[in-house]
Amino acid sequence: MPAPRAADPIKPDAKAALIVIDVQNCFVDGGTLPVKGGADIVPIINKLAPAFANIVITQDWHTPGHVSFASAHSGKKPFETTQLSYGTQVLWPDHCIQGTEDAAVLKDLKLPKAELVIRKGYHTDTDSYSAFKEADGKTPTGLAGYLKERGIDTVFLVGLATDFCVAWSAVDARKAGFTTYVIEDATRAIDLNGSLAAAWKQMTEAGVKRIQSGDIRLG
Ligand code: VGL
Ligand code: ZN
């Protein structure tokens, strides 16, 4: 018997886009910054994708020696923090370096219709968890403009990691005026020092709608 649903199924229309955040080798087992269960979301995303007229993919795409890497800060270890000009930065293992196999999108992801790939985090001195704005809070990636020019007003977010790139993208999507859904079971989290609960609180306060893949009507 299917799981009971809280509300009527949601049918994404021509003004909706599926945004697939950072489903890259770096964020699954065998990668440089693995997220627990990260690869488990691939079949869920593959099942959802045909229901969408528009699909956008993002890739975390760092320079070697990127400011978000602990290795770029003497005396710092991964998962510690440091203060940068734009605020507190979590320091990560070296990950998702431009052009490497580690930064490639998972081969099993089947998104033949994906129309745009947004790369982010490619400025050495600035991180970018969000698909919309770099961590300085100012520099746009161009995604909001792209979506608006194409008449898209609603975004559905899936991918990695729930509490970093998905959450920051979802909050920025709301700031840019999009109706925003996060499909929770098509995400996995890093959950560093309570970051997952904090991220859901911020997303909820920003008006992000938290749904499950079973809430989407596929046919
Ligand atoms: C991410 C940490 C560092 C993410 C990217 O995709 O959530 N997390 N870089
Ligand atoms: Zn990164």
Image (cartoon, rainbow, N blue to C red):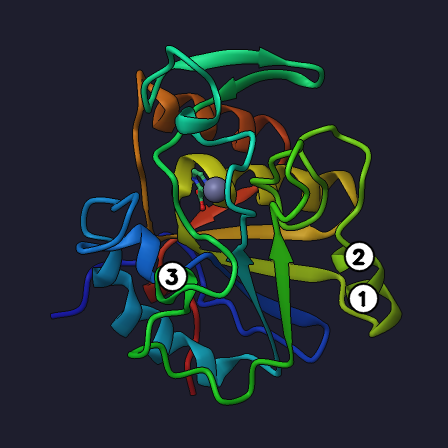
Give the residue at x 61% y 40%. 128
Residue 142 is tagged as 2
Quadrant in the rendering for residue 85: top right
Residue 180, compared with residue 58, is above or below; it is above
Q: Nearer the viewer, residue 112 or 67?
A: 67
Residue 201, compared with residue 30, is above or below; it is above
Residue 146 is tagged as 1
Tag 3: residue type? Gln
Task: Check if mark 1's residue and mark 2's residue have beta carbons within 8 Å.
Answer: yes
* SS type, badge 3: loop
Tag 2: residue type? Gly
Give the residue at x 57% y 37%. 168
* SS type, badge 1: helix
> Dot 3: within a 10 Å radius of its alpha carbon, few (fewer than 14), some, or many (20 or more) residues?
many
Residue 25, compared with residue 65, is above or below; it is below
Disc 3 Cβ-to-ligand 1 distance below 8 Å: yes
* SS type, badge 2: loop
Q: Which of the two discs, 1 and 2, sits closer to the camera?
A: 2
Residue at which label 3 appears? 24
Quadrant in the rendering for residue 100: bottom left
Rounded to the nearest angstrom, the CA distance separating label 2 from label 3 is: 21 Å
Rounded to the nearest angstrom, the CA distance separating label 3 from label 1 is: 23 Å
Of the image marks 3 and 1, the number of the one nearer the N terminus: 3
> Dot 1: within a 10 Å radius of its alpha carbon, few (fewer than 14), some, or many (20 or more) residues?
few
Tag 1: residue type? Tyr
Position in image of residue 137 (x %, y %) = 75, 30
Residue 216, compared with residue 128, is above or below; it is below
